[in-house]
Image (cartoon, rainbow, N blue to C red):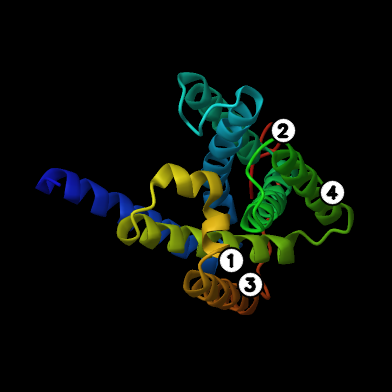
Amino acid sequence: MTTDSFLAVMCGAMIALLFGLAVCFAGYRLFLVLIPIWAFVFGFGLGAQTVQVIFGDAFLATVTSWVVGFIAALICAVLSYLFYIFAVALVAGSLGYSAAVGLLTALGLDFGLIVWLIGLVAAVALAVVVLRFNIQKIVIELATAFLGAGAIIGTFVALFSGVRSTELIQLGTRWVLQNPLWLIVFIVLGVLGLVAQIRNDRRFEVSTYNRLTTSTP
């Protein structure tokens, strides 16, 4: 690895690590800033996985998967920036999807149509429950704490374990669940992030918004 490429990798890793820390320990407080970024990342992965399931190609192996991934990412990022309800639904949905797909693949199922469909059902179900029972705050704190913990671990795994970044984007949750040491670190980080957010955000509430009709306070 050349010096330039090493510096590029380390810079990228530092950015990913800082983003993961911000999401994990201050996800709710920084929700308005972080949600478009997270929506872009999740939308890209979901779009690419959808192409993978439909056409049977490897993850991000075709131009189509990259194009669809970027389109989905942009749509998710823009909608989450414009509408609070969509942002909350996306955070809850990404938690449900990641947990369902990760658990099923960790149990030995190959990622395919069935796993993808179950992941989507879990995403929609959790989003509906969160909005129906008005539990946005605790779910945002829970989701950001553990999704941020996953981003932190993913950064170290990509740097030191030889796992390709595309594999982490595709099935990072499965990789963590199948490695006891990383699983313990993941749980500890997630719990610490959740506790920190609950304590720090007792008197803080994110303002709802619809940027198409009103300005954010």
At x 65% / y 34%, what residue is drawn?
79
User: Closer to the N terminus: mark 1 or mark 4?
Assistant: 4
At x 50% / y 67%, what residue is drawn?
179
Q: Nearer the viewer, mark 3 or mark 1?
A: 1
What is the x, y in percent for residue 24? 53, 65
Residue that badge 1 annotates: 145
Residue that badge 4 annotates: 128
Badge number at residue 49: none
The disc labelled 4 sits on which kind of residue? Val
The disc labelled 3 sits on which kind of residue? Asp
Residue that badge 3 annotates: 201
How far is mark 1 from mark 2, CA to CA? 31 Å
Mark 1 burial class by Cα count in 10 Å: few <14, some 14-19, many 20+: many
Labels 2 & 4 near each other (Cβ < 8 A): no
At x 33% / y 54%, what residue is drawn?
162
**Relative to 83, residue 75 above or below:** above
Q: Quadrant of residue 178?
A: bottom right
What is the x, y in percent for residue 117? 75, 39
Report the residue that reaches farthest toward the front: 108
Report the residue that reaches farthest toward the left: 3
User: Closer to the N terminus: mark 1 or mark 2?
Assistant: 1
Q: Quadrant of residue 161?
A: bottom left
Q: Nearer the viewer, mark 1 or mark 2?
A: 1
**Relative to 56, residue 207 above or below:** below
Q: Nearer the viewer, mark 2 or mark 3?
A: 3
Q: Is residue 83 left or right of residue 161?
A: right
Residue that badge 2 annotates: 213
Labels 1 & 4 near each other (Cβ < 8 A): no
Examine the rendering and report whether any part of residue 208 can be seen. Answer: no
Helix, strand or loop at mark 2? loop
Q: Nearer the viewer, residue 80 or 6?
A: 6
The disc labelled 1 sits on which kind of residue? Ala
